[in-house]
Amino acid sequence: MAGLVPAIHVFYADYKQDVDARHKAGHDAGENVMSSAVSPLAPTNVPDMPEIAGVRLATAEAGIRYKNRTDVLLVLFEPGTTVAGVFTKSKCPSAPVEWCRANLKSGKARALVVNSGNANAFTGKNGRASTKLTADTTAKAVGCKAGEIFLASTGVIGEPLDASKFAPVMASLNERAQAGDFAAAAKAIMTTDTFPKVATATAKIGKAKVTINGIAKGAGMIAPDMATMLSFIFTDAAISAPALQALLKDGVTDTFNAVTIDGDTSTSDTLMMFATGKAKDCPKIARASDPHLKAFKKALQAVLADLSEQVARDGEGARKLVEIVVEGAASKASARKIAMSIANSPLVKTAIAGEDANWGRVVMAVGKAGEPADRDKLSIWFAGIRVAHKGMRDPSYDEAKVSAEMKKPEIFLKVALGMGKGRDRVLTCDLTKEYIAINGDYRS
């Protein structure tokens, strides 16, 4: 597919069997859990997720919401680890988001705790008390300050989180944590995801070889205004917290912030990055503008792009991955707004689900975006075939040819506005009956 990351790496060997078991367990317990069917858009290549020096991970079953599946992740960091983060711009953020924002100022991290099944959002004073109890419990087990603990939660909004469930498993998590188990980590943070999302890359900083690993979760309530539902990046590079923050903020612009599933921004959106500084002979980087970071920036961008595309591929009920390119706009910002207007249109998304190259719906989405556009300069392509030109159906339009292309699992949609040099690209998916089924009974 034009413009997509060429090699998407994800591991879910033996994963369907694991999902089926959880699905049956949840059904027996009368709970709504993820679908037993792995998305048909799921990547197939499996990466060798290397260890990151200074990072250890462990997962456990705490019974937060799901039965017979891991739902808590603990990540431990060696002293000296720096941290950066970007979070939802929602005016109704979760308690963990508020906790992380406050602690991010120190730039230091010793542990990350993530739970699935309950977002600890819209939970009032009880939510804040839960974050403090979780952090205090973890700090005691790890042997550090509560302010060095970072938290993230995902799942149902509005339900109280019983943080006392962390205490029985925290000591064991701390003892069992080991390097390299990113497969288990990716599985433990999922909710309606149908496959775990991971990515890895290496780069040189000076003469030192450094590694970047990332995990993510997200399949619905995805229209990021910073990052995605949850994503965590780990590296053994030695980068100061301010530099790490600048790199991360810049990195999300054309990756996670250019993905939408349903137009809804979560209360819990969290993307954090941790740098242990344990790579052998790695020079200490103080500024994001340091020329030594040239290769590192490219590698980080590749990891973020990889993970964000996997989120689009796992959109709830998705059967089509859709890449939308808008060019000839008044500016890049204008192109982004128009592309998002198209990507978030239920009419466009359902037409694609029905394998209908309905350019009329694309015209509608362009027109409602509120950006500079001229109907009589507008051209539209589906799968590289021009279907509309200069404000009307293309004279050479061939319904049969376009229909054949629309049956493919990956759809490329391009719009040329003829207004300027602005260009942008976003990813989305189609909108199917399965999306309604998943969300119609998500809480009940």
Image: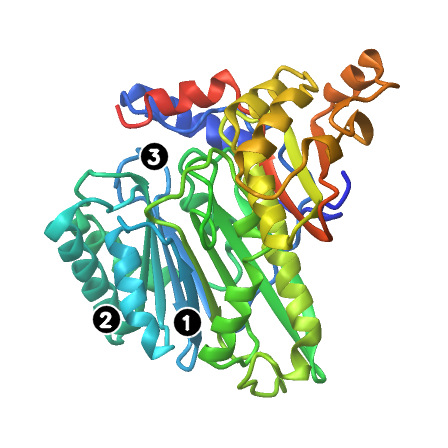
Under tag 2, what secondary structure? helix
Label annotation for residue 68: 3
Left or right: residue 408 versus residue 165 is: right
Judged from this view, the residue extending furthest toward the right is: 396
Q: Quadrant of the C terminus?
A: top left
The residues bearing labels 1 and 2 have C-alpha atoms spaced at a distance of 14 Å
- Quarter assignment of residue 392: top right
Image coordinates for residue 268, horizontal then vertical, percent: 34, 49
Query: What residue is disc 1 on?
Result: 77
Is the residue 86 above or below the residue 161 in the image?
below
Query: What residue is disc 2 on?
Result: 146
Q: Nearer the viewer, residue 185 or 82?
A: 82
Under tag 1, what secondary structure? strand
Judged from this view, the residue extending furthest toward the left is: 125
Q: Earlier in the sequence, mark 2 or mark 3?
A: 3
Amino acid, disc 3: Asn
Image coordinates for residue 233, horizontal then vertical, percent: 51, 61
Judged from this view, the residue extending furthest toward the top is: 400
Between circles 1 and 3, the one closer to the viewer is 1
Q: Residues within 10 Å of mark 3 (few under 14, many from 20)?
A: some
Q: Earlier in the sequence, mark 1 or mark 3?
A: 3
Q: Earlier in the sequence, mark 1 or mark 2?
A: 1
Q: Residue at x 49, y 76 (%)?
A: 276
The residues bearing labels 1 and 3 have C-alpha atoms spaced at a distance of 28 Å
Left or right: residue 198 versus residue 125 is: right
Query: Is there any visible trace of residue 29 in the rendered image?
Result: yes
Amino acid, disc 1: Phe
Q: Residue at x 52, y 66 (%)?
A: 248
Q: Residue at x 70, y 84 (%)?
A: 206
Image coordinates for residue 281, horizontal then vertical, percent: 63, 87
Is the residue 27 above or below the residue 109 in the image?
above
Query: Is there any visible trace of residue 14 in the rendered image?
Result: no
